[in-house]
Image (tube, coloured by chain):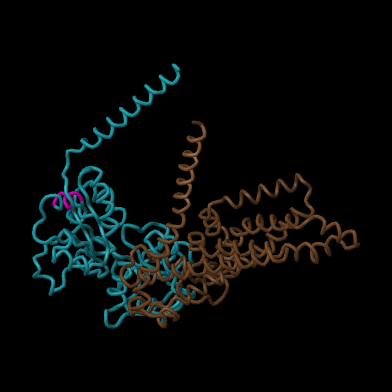
Chain colours: A cyan, B brown
């Protein structure tokens, strides 16, 4: 009898404690509330989602939803007012410039050609790169290196980075898309790409600047080294900003969210893992 | 008083169990509905002729998935070629000749192998097997052969334990009669025990095949991957599962729908397998 009574008291205590924790937790953050919706570039999507998760942790009554769809979809939807923010991995086209969109640059991305450390070549011209990725050049000796078969590694066909590389390095356009060499190995992230290049003899691929390390060898493109400076002054063509567009200046929760994305904490802790953070771009 | 309360309790338990059982049915119905719904744009806008071609290039609107189907079939077949002899041998050893202690040891070993997460096997394949094959064959090392070995290791425990059960259900009188007639142990196994257990062994192989056909992460690590037909056993290629894994993250629109159509093809393959199991087991009942 007494045992039962004790269990009852302990049980009630636990329930009370749980309720208190929930109530206090709910009242905890005195941050903003409201809903923010984003859609657009699948390149921006992971950063936007990570920012959304952290933002909602700080502001429990705010609700941020991030969707993909591609840069054009994001720009269209934000100008129509379907979403609060349109994510884009490209700038505005001429016909999009009078839609009243405000540009928030959230990161800078430089794509660097990389090869297996065993490859003796240091520089490739635009034509050589095109030849290698489309299959007309198949041996390193054709580019001035020592004899060895070239293994091409590319990103998966849904990747935004691949789209940018195909356009800016290979000259692919919507009307005349470039077909890559058959048998190109596919990597579905920067990390996997670096790993494949490091472990495959005679391989060539490309990654975001933030992922460069000693396991792979970076190449010059048309004699120019890809880095922050050359990317910013446009002597190196394989570079771009990642954008968030709003219709007019953002207000309320949308403004708070964009401020969070651009905050030094988020830029220096999260953005820097994959891209060049705006904090570094602004120092230049 | 006791009686009425036990009846109502039974009624409640019955309803709860019914609801739980319906959850499983509901789950499979929802999966089929969702996958079918999501693949409709692929089937109508891309069309069967495009889907069953060999070119995959979403930019030009080519969504041929034949390369991936071939990859799935080849790796599964390769996995079975490795797993079936191993598993049948182990099952025969366990049921026909192993001393009890030895049998327990092997059984535990097979059980542990069955429990190893596929990512661990895939990782070992990626760090040990692929470099070894690359050195031996002077190629990339990734491809059908590496994937088959990985899948063979993974489906072997499933096949072994079901095959063992099938062999154990063969009445011992068969064996005794065969030995009594002067047959050797090998003759008994080959002409009496294996034929008697055949439907059960077929079930074992098909369930092992089911394990191999759906495996994704471990295969993705050792298959290459590349969207092209394999030129040899050690050149990169793709399977249905690895292609879905690679492209689901960033895909949208029609391309996403085609990935669902590939999932639909996988569903059909696995349902076909279950159907075969049903037919095989029905035959078994007739035979008795």
Position of A62 compared to B70: left or right?
Answer: left
In which quadrant is the N terminus of chain A drawn?
top left
The answer to whether residue A216 is seen in the rendering is no
- For image coordinates 22% across by 49% down, the residue present is A63
Report the front residue among B48 and A276: B48
> Residue B284 location in percent, x, y?
68, 64
> Between residues B180 and B158, which one lies in front from this camera angle?
B180
Identify the image quadrant of residue B32: bottom left
- Is B166 or A26 nearer to us in this picture? B166
Give the dominant element type of the magenta stretch: helix, strand or loop. Answer: helix
Residue shown at 58% from the left, 72% from the top: B233
Q: Quadrant of residue B35?
A: bottom left
In the rendering, at what x and y percent does residue B10 appear? 50, 41
Please state the extent of the stretch shown in magenta in the rendering.
A255-260
Q: Residue at x 45, y 42 (%)?
A: B12
Res B62 visible: yes
Residue B240 image point, x, y percent: 47, 69
């Amino acid at each position: 009898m007494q045992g039962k009574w004790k269990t009852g008291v302990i049980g009630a205590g636990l329930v009370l404690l749980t309720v208190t924790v929930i109530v206090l937790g709910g009242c905890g953050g005195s941050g903003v509330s409201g809903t923010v919706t984003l859609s657009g570039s699948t390149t921006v999507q992971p950063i936007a989602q990570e920012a959304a998760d952290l933002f909602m942790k700080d502001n429990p009554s705010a609700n941020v939803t991030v969707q993909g769809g591609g840069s054009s979809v994001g720009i269209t939807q934000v100008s129509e007012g379907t979403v609060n923010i349109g994510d884009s991995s490209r700038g505005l086209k001429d016909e999009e410039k009078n839609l009243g969109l405000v540009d928030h640059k959230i990161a800078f991305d430089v794509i660097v050609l990389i090869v297996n450390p065993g490859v003796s070549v240091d520089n490739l011209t635009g034509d050589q790169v095109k030849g290698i990725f489309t299959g007309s050049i198949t041996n390193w000796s054709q580019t001035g290196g020592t004899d060895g078969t070239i293994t091409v590694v590319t990103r998966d066909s849904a990747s935004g980075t691949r789209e940018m590389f195909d356009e800016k390095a290979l000259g692919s356009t919507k009307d005349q898309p470039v077909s890559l060499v058959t048998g190109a190995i596919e990597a579905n992230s920067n990390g996997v790409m670096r790993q494949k290049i490091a472990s495959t003899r005679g391989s060539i691929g490309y990654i975001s600047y933030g992922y460069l390390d000693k396991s792979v060898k970076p190449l010059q493109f048309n004699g120019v080294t890809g880095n922050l400076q050359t990317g910013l002054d446009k002597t190196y063509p394989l570079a771009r900003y990642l954008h968030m567009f709003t219709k007019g200046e953002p207000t309320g929760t949308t403004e708070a969210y964009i401020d969070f994305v651009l905050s030094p904490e988020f830029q220096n802790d999260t953005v820097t893992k994959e891209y060049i953070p705006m904090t570094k771009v602004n120092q230049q | 008083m006791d009686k009425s309360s036990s009846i109502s309790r039974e009624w409640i338990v019955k309803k709860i169990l019914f609801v739980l059982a319906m959850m499983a049915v509901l789950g499979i119905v929802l999966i089929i509905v969702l996958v079918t719904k999501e693949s409709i744009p692929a089937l109508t806008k891309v069309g069967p002729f495009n889907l069953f071609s060999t070119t995959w290039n979403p930019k030009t609107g080519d969504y041929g998935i034949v390369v991936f189907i071939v990859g799935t079939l080849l790796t599964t077949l390769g996995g079975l070629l490795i797993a079936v002899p191993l598993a049948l041998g182990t099952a025969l050893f366990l049921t026909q000749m192993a001393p009890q202690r030895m049998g327990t040891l092997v059984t535990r070993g097979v059980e542990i192998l069955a429990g190893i997460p596929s990512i661990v096997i895939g990782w070992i394949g990626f760090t040990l097997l692929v470099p070894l094959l690359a050195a031996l064959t002077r190629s990339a090392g990734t491809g059908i052969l590496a994937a088959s070995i990985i899948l063979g290791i993974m489906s072997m425990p499933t096949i072994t334990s079901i095959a063992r059960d099938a062999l154990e259900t063969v009445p011992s009188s068969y064996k005794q009669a065969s030995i009594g007639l002067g047959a050797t142990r090998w003759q008994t196994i080959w002409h009496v025990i294996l034929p008697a257990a055949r439907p059960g062994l077929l079930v074992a192989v098909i369930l092992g095949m089911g394990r191999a056909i759906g495996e994704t992460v471990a295969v993705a690590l050792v298959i290459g991957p590349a969207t092209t037909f394999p030129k040899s056993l050690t050149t990169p290629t793709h399977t249905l599962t690895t292609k879905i894994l690679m492209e689901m993250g960033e895909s949208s629109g029609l391309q996403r729908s085609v990935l669902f159509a590939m999932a639909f093809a996988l569903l059909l393959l696995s349902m076909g397998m279950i159907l075969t199991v049903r037919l095989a087991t029905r035959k078994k009942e007739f035979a008795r």
